[in-house]
Amino acid sequence: MKMKLEFPAKIIRKPIVSEICLNTGVLINLERVNIEATWATMIVDVEEKIEEVTRAFEEKGVEVEILEEPIRRDDGRCVHCGICSSICAMGVFSFGEDYKVEMDPSRCIVCKNCIELCPTGALEIY
């Protein structure tokens, strides 16, 4: 399950992710991290104990948003040009046997490259 974590400035320098991994026994895969002077945002993937991990982050002062489907496509706007598949390093997009773009949203790390390059605006972040 993908989660978006937002850290306020006062806790950016604390090893919160490490602590939660140790305390819960759950491995947390960091997929995208953006740290600035006054805030930090992470997209992480957690495969088990979702409620326990969510609660642990929230108790530390981290805002948690569950990303059930991190990226969506409007099939009415998609022309299956494949630009998304050429830019996506994570393999979210591929061509199917019918030469239409297929997608696996679970692979998305919310880098937004595909959204910025989609000529028809068919893609959006959840």
Image (spheres, rainbow, N blue to C red):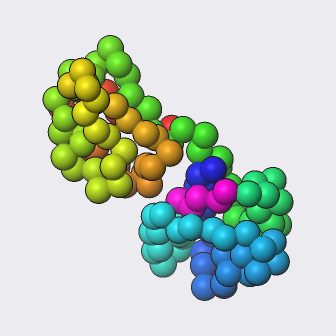
| 81 part of magenta stretch | no
Which residue appears at 48% of the width and 78% of the height?
Answer: 37
Q: On the picture, is 118 further left or further right than 68?
A: left
Q: Position of residue 51 (x, y in %)?
A: 81, 53
Q: Is residue 94 visible?
A: yes
Task: Give 10 or 42, whichever is nearer the viewer.
Answer: 42
Specify the quadrant of the image occupied by residue 94. top left
Specify the quadrant of the image occupied by residue 34. bottom left
Which residue appears at 59% of the width and 52% of the height?
Answer: 2
Q: On the picture, is 90 further left or further right than 95?
A: right
Q: Is residue 10 visible?
A: no
Specify the quadrant of the image occupied by residue 103. top left
Task: Give 82 or 76, whichever is nearer the viewer.
Answer: 82
Q: Position of residue 7 (x, y in %)?
A: 62, 68
Q: Position of residue 113 (x, y in %)?
A: 28, 50
The residue stretch that appears in magenta? 43-47
